[in-house]
Amino acid sequence: LVHGTSHGGWCWVRVAERLRTLGHRVFTPTLTGLGERLHLMSVDINLDTHISDVVNVIKWEGLHDVVLCGHSYGGWVISGAAEQIGDRIGSIVYLDAFLPIDGQRGIDTQSPDSREDVLAASRAGAASRPAGSASRYGLNGADLAWVDSLLTPQPIGVSLQPIRLTGVRDRIPKKAYILATGYSNPPFVAAHAALKNDPSWHLFDLPCHHDVMVEMPDELTNILLEVA
């Protein structure tokens, strides 16, 4: 389970606990420079760094027939990981996530506010951009307080490096896209819509905001089991 911008492996705790209770092995790696690995923040972090974070867990843990799920920015990471270990992936799942094409950069698909944050950080020679608040993801109350307390700055280098894709992702036997209908981020809505005519993809939607693993862990767990 691969997290998105400014999050960490911690965000999956509710889903991971449910899957482990059912007897599954679950890995929730935190990408370099984020979460409990924030002390590793560096201007040298790029998309390849985060792809390697995921690929190396799969290799060193000896995993095969993996269900690889990426949330939001994590869609970039799992797409790149598939290029290297596609033969170990049984199912790939995009959870309200970017579905990049070859040669794209993260900054090409970000919202105007996020794009400006990246450009401003780049002009200043900074390694990261601020996390902001998870209120923009529709969270409130105790969930908002919990998530906001753990968000960390996002490295900007991951948004500036073009991704290289050769079609490995599309050859994975089981593919799924889960759309959070309460968030309606244009790139995610467009990706979900574009896949409707592709019979090799299984499409789902959930009536929640962006942090699906926080708001609807039971429903998300059930979908992950189904696509496996």
Image (tube, rainbow, N blue to C red):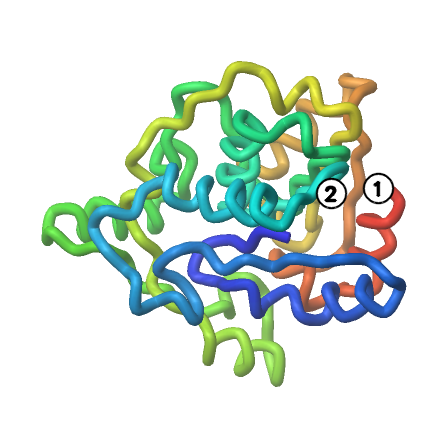
Give the CA distance from mark 1 to mark 2.
6 Å
Q: Residues within 10 Å of mark 2 (few under 14, many from 20)?
A: many
* Residue 116, image x, y percentages: 26, 47
Tell how many labels. Answer: 2
Q: For this rendering, which residue is in front, 18 or 151? A: 18
Q: For this rendering, which residue is in front, 71 or 29? A: 29
**Looking at the image, can residue 206 be seen?**
yes
Q: Residue furthest left?
A: 124
* Residue 111, image x, y percentages: 40, 44
Residue at figure coordinates x 40%, y 41% from the top left: 110
Q: Is residue 60 above or below residue 83?
A: below
Numbered label attached to residue 67:
2
Residue at figure coordinates x 72%, y 70% from the top left: 14
Q: Residues within 10 Å of mark 1 (few under 14, many from 20)?
A: some
Do the numbered discs 1 and 2 sit on residues whose CB atoms are within 8 Å? yes
Q: For this rendering, which residue is in front, 90 or 5? A: 90
* Residue 210, image x, y percentages: 61, 56
Residue receiving disc 1:
228
Q: Is residue 224 above or below residue 215?
A: above
| Residue type (three-letter) at the residue carrying disc 1 | Ala
**Looking at the image, can residue 132 be seen?**
no
Q: Earlier in the sequence, mark 1 or mark 2?
A: 2
| Residue type (three-letter) at the residue carrying disc 2 | Val
Asked whether, in this view, residue 209 is left or right of residue 24, the answer is left
Q: Secondary structure at mark 2?
A: strand
Residue at figure coordinates x 40%, y 25% from the top left: 104
Asked whether, in this view, residue 164 is left or right of residue 189, the answer is left
Residue at figure coordinates x 38%, y 37% from the top left: 48
Q: Secondary structure at mark 1?
A: loop
Asked whether, in this view, residue 41 is left or right of residue 184, the answer is left
Q: For this rendering, which residue is in front, 140 or 125? A: 125
